[in-house]
Amino acid sequence: MLRVTVFSFGYKYGLPKEMNLLWDVRFLPNPYWVESLRQRTGQEKDVADYAIGNPAGRKFLQMVEPLLLFLVEQYLAIQKDNLYIAVGCTGGRHRSVAVVEALRKMLEKQSVDLSFFHRDIEKG
C-alpha cells in the first residue's frame, strides 16, 4: 500500500529534506497580516477561510485535486512505497496548514496509508 505523507512547513525555517512534491502557497492571502488571526493557525476555520476561502485559494484547490488524485493513481500503478508532499508558506502556521488540511480531506477517500503533520506550526 502506498504511504502518502502530506505536511506543511515554513520557508523561513528551511526546506524539508524529504519530499517528492512541493507546493509553494505564498501566493495566497496571508492571515499573519490580520491582527486577530496572527497568533492562530490554519487549522482554525476562520483562518483557513481567510487563506483558502477566496478566489485564488478555491481555484488552487480545484486545480490541484485532479492532479493529486492522478499522481496517487500513478504512484500506486508503479508500486511506489511512499509519496511525500510538502506545502510551504512563509512561517508554516497559516496558509500551508490550511492547504494541508484541505489536501488531507481529498486524500482520505483514497486507498492509501495517509499521514499528515505540520512541521513548523508552533514556531511562528
Image (cartoon, rainbow, N blue to C red):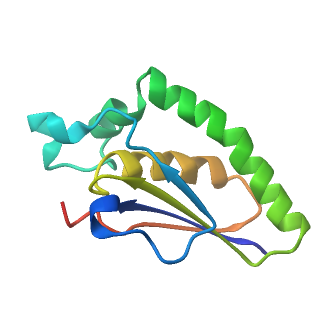
Q: Nearer the viewer, residue 98 or 13?
A: 13
Question: In the image, is 32 to the left or to the right of 69?
Answer: left
Q: Nearer the viewer, residue 14 or 78?
A: 14
The residue depicted at 40 percent of the width and 50 percent of the height is: 96
The residue depicted at 89 percent of the width and 70 percent of the height is: 78
The image position of residue 114, as x and y in percent, is: 62, 67
The image position of residue 57, as x and y in percent, is: 46, 31
The residue depicted at 26 percent of the width and 56 percent of the height is: 91
Question: In the image, is 8 to the left or to the right of 108?
Answer: left
Question: In the image, is 66 to the left or to the right of 19?
Answer: right
Q: Residue 4's image quarter?
A: bottom right
Q: Residue 36's image quarter?
A: top left
Q: Is residue 77 above or below residue 27?
A: below
The image position of residue 87, as x and y in percent, is: 47, 55
Which quadrant of the rendered structure holds the N terminus? bottom right
Residue placed farthest to the top in the image? 55
Q: Is residue 21 above or below residue 94?
A: below
The image position of residue 40, as x and y in percent, is: 19, 49
Which quadrant of the rendered structure holds the C terminus? bottom left
Residue placed farthest to the left in the image? 35
Q: Residue 8's image quarter?
A: bottom left
The residue depicted at 15 percent of the width and 33 percent of the height is: 34
Q: Nearer the viewer, residue 107 or 7?
A: 7
Q: How many marks?
A: 0
Q: Nearer the viewer, residue 105 or 120?
A: 120
Residue placed farthest to the right in the image? 77
